[in-house]
Image (cartoon, rainbow, N blue to C red):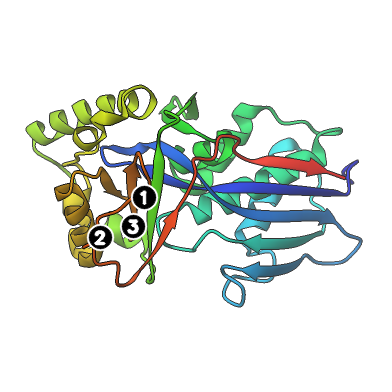
Amino acid sequence: MPARATARVRVPATSANLGPGFDTLGLALGLWDEVELGVVDAPSCRVDVEGEGAGRVPRDGRHLVLRAAHATFDRAGAPRASLHLRCRNAIPHSRGLGSSAAAAVAGIVAARALLADTHPLDDAAVLDLAAGFDGHADNVAACLYGGLVVSWGHEGSWHAAHLTPHPALRPVALVADRSSSTEATRGLLPDRVPHADAAFTAARSALIVHALTCEPELLLAATEDRLHQPYRRPAYPETAAAVDHLRAAGIPAVVSGAGPTVLALTLDGRLPDDLDTTGFAVRPLAVDTEGARVETG
């Protein structure tokens, strides 16, 4: 039995890729899910959900937060406990804002807090666990650490470098009314791309790290991508049209993660007056600089 009976965690939304940084770059945003995980003397787990996903997500051990928590117990070598999960969700599901990454991180971080006194886990194990649920570390690393992250895999483990975004950055999300499947949009990607396109995108992925941290005036050029966004356009034509309109107006805009949300990386929080936002909710969002936060008790 864990020494601590309850852990409360807040985890931010994230936007991955940011244009050219496919499966590598992630940015934490000021929109949060709140999770409370408690050990209970009961034969099975219980789940209560408010907000996003209420009535649609599993209410038992299949819930992603619980699956991540149980995986953490297993990784730490601790016996699994029956858990009561309470979620207050604000991150839209299946919109390209890292909802699944946030759920996995919340479960792992909460379970780690419960086990801290008896079966401690280091940061590397936490990142590896979280990336295992997403298949890559861009969203989960940004969710864990906040700010901007560059992530990579090496010899079976995941790593991330945490960077501080430029303070002038004022992201605006155009959150799509409809959802999108990451698996479906990945299915549109080709097995091979032209060498020239790979070289173009590699240059932009290096430039965007500099632009996001030091020289945001370069973001329009830095967010150009030829690796994944052009191939995904058929999945969400309205998203592609919004990105095109914003970029034509000089605003750095990208598909957020696998879409269909659009992320505009503005310096003033303003969008063109003639932008058609039908089908989108416009959400100015701060950059989250803290990442996953835990309060135990």
In the rendered view, would you say 25 is above or below 228? above
In the rendered view, would you say 144 is above or below 7? above
Q: How far apart are marks 2 and 1 (CA)?
A: 25 Å
Mark 3 vs mark 2, foreground winner is 2
Cβ atoms at labels 3 and 1 below 8 Å apart: yes
Secondary structure, mark 2, is loop
Residue 88's quadrant in the figure?
bottom right
- In this figure, which residue is indicated by the disc labeled 2? 273
Image coords of residue 132 (percent x, y): 52, 43
Cβ atoms at labels 3 and 2 below 8 Å apart: no
Residue toward you, 220 or 141: 220
Image coords of residue 41 (percent x, y): 92, 61
Residue 195's quadrant in the figure?
top left
Indicate the quadrant containing the C terminus: top left, top right, bottom left or bottom right: top right
Residue toward you, 59 or 245: 245
Secondary structure, mark 3, is loop
Q: Please indicate whether residue 139 sits to the left or right of residue 202 in the image.
A: right
Inspect the image, locate mark 3, and give the three-letter code of the amino acid beneath it.
Gly
Q: Residues within 10 Å of mark 1 (few under 14, many from 20)?
A: many
In the rendered view, would you say 55 is above or below 28? below
Mark 2 vs mark 1, foreground winner is 2
**Is residue 73 visible in the rendered structure shown here?**
no
- In this figure, which residue is indicated by the disc labeled 1? 257
Q: Please indicate whether residue 212 sits to the left or right of residue 76 in the image.
A: left
Q: How far apart are marks 3 and 1 (CA)?
A: 5 Å
Q: Residue at x 57, y 67 (%)?
A: 52
